[in-house]
Amino acid sequence: MDKVLLHVEGITVHYGRLAAVRDVSITVNEGEIVCVVGPNGAGKSTTLLSISGVLNPSSGNIVFSGEKINGIRPEIVARKGISQVPEGRHVFTTLSVEENLRIGAQIRKDRAEIEKDIKRVQELFPILGERRRQSAGKLSGGEQQMLVIGRALLTKPKIMTIDEPSLGLAPNIVDRVYEVLTTLREERGMTLLIVEQSSERALKAADRLYVIRNGEIQIEGKASELQDGEKIRQAYFGFNDEKNTVAEASS
Amino acid sequence: MQDIVKNFNYKKILSDKRALVILGIVISIIGIIVAVTDPVRFQILITSVSEGSFYALAALGIGLLFGVLRLINFAYGDWVMLAGYALILPSTAVTSTLIIGSFHPVLIVLIIIGFTVLLSVLSESTVFRPMRNTNPAIMMIASFALGYVLQNLTIMIYGGRPKSAGIFEELTQTVDLAEGVSVPLLKIITIGVTAVLLILLTLFLHRTRIGIQMRAAAEDFRMARMLGVRANFVIAMAFVISGFLASFVSLMYVTQIGILTFRMGTPIIVFAFIATVIGGMGSLVGSVVGGMVVGVSSVVLKNILPGSIRGFSDAFVFGIVIAILLARPQGLVPAKSARERV
């Protein structure tokens, strides 16, 4: 039986009076790549931000390695081993590339290991080594995506959550990003929870996936069982479902 | 030629970063050339750069907190004021008695630094920490409230009358720099101390782990926290540094003026705040540049305006400020986070 690493148990998150996600449950096992797919505004980012402790669910629980973590401050969540690469990358543009990486490592005490890990990240993404003294704002979008993945890795996380790694990037660069993510799992057994708009990308990369729309999980399943795509399309767009079609048309 | 005149657009120059830097260098060089040819002008140069340094330090104390916390701290001037009052015996008597102010100079500086840092950290933990998640306008109003409380506490303890506090009086004596150029030693020390503090602050922000965390937090606080940067610690450090800078502002000001009043912080905070705004809110380089612009233009105008309107020189300073803001509403050296926040 797989070992559960992260368990989101029926969380509901409100922005003011508006519920952005309702009763969402997600399970991520150790060493798995899980994708959460859904259209804009479905509640994907809200879910990830709740896991990271930035948002506080009004009900439900988030359990990480058997410990309840909802309501804990984001810096503590990061120290427990959940590292998020948020939507829009968020490099520190005024810091140099290397300073960005070192910020990732600052929660660790194992100095010798940190230097080795920085070297390793620079081997994984050579551009980060070449440009380590440049300010991170000067990197291209793809390079910035590499930088934030490298930075998240340096926190030595047990799980990485990644919000739309393909946002605003050219398709060949997105390929490269996903290549790196799968390598991370293959070579280091990294557990990944990826949020993605493109269900094709998700189907290729993930072991299992969840489709979320209007703040609710529509379907979930193994990627191998959802390959034909028809089920996903239905869940994603809400077609062939009279009630939702009407709701969609009126909105 | 006519085309050049027609296409000349001062807003365009001011909106281009490189043109702005060149413009700044050109103005500085012209200023220095004009100054070295004449002893009186040279004196004005030293005095104005010293005034600029003073406001640069004060503006940094405000800019730093704004960068990390989005707090516009109007109580900063009252920290400066209280640091001055800390020199004398707490009593409402008409004549004041120096207590800490009569110690050895090194001891005075150390105690005042400690006092102001403590005041700053206490302000954070009692007033600003509970309000951290409200919006910046509410925090700003809270800083006004804190300022009033501090002023009224001062009146309660020391009385409302101005009090004398002469410290480092030997520094107000003038020294001859060259033939016909004599300036108070304090002016030169102000420039020197500011230069040293700026270098220390730069080293701290770029070479230490905490410094790098502070810069990261100033740019994108949420992301920094998601990487494990402790919000409470970074904010407390920002208050420590802000209080540290306030202690030097206070020591310089009290040495210069020699008199304490419970309202003495107000003009300092007004000019320092204006300096941070024209420099670019939240940008530390901007705070220094803004402080220099305000200080230098204030002294220069006081000296070159014709006697009949010299009394209104502040109005001309504010005129320059308005002109800068019309052309560059984001400030001369805008902070990254102010531009990119989504």
Image (tube, helix red, strand yellow):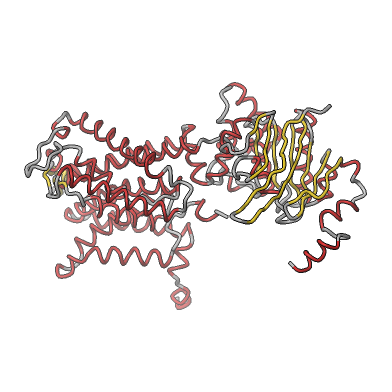
- The total number of labels drawn is 0
Q: Residue A70, percent across and down?
A: 62, 38
Give how far across and how far down residue A107 sits, in percent: 56, 30
Residue A19 vs residue B70: left or right? right
Task: Specify whether residue B189 is in view.
Answer: no
Q: In this orientation, which residue lies closer to the viewer: B261 or A15?
A: A15
Residue A134's quadrant in the figure?
top right
Outermost residue, front side: A59
Question: Does A230 sit left or right of B9 as displayed?
Answer: right
Q: Is residue B235 left or right of A18 when viewed as pictured? A: left
Viewer-closest of B129 and B341? B129
* Residue A190 position by quadrant: top right
Residue at x 64% of width, y 25% of height: A116
Determine if residue A240 is in view.
yes
- Nearest to the observer: residue B280 or residue A60: A60
> As rendered, which of A140 and B92 lies closer to the eye?
B92
Q: Residue B36 location in percent, x, y?
A: 23, 53
Q: Which quadrant holds the N terminus of chain B? A: bottom left
Q: Is residue A13 above or below residue B3?
A: above
Quadrant where the C terminus of chain B sits is bottom right
- Residue A61 % position (x, y): 67, 38
Residue farthest along the left direction in this orientation? B95
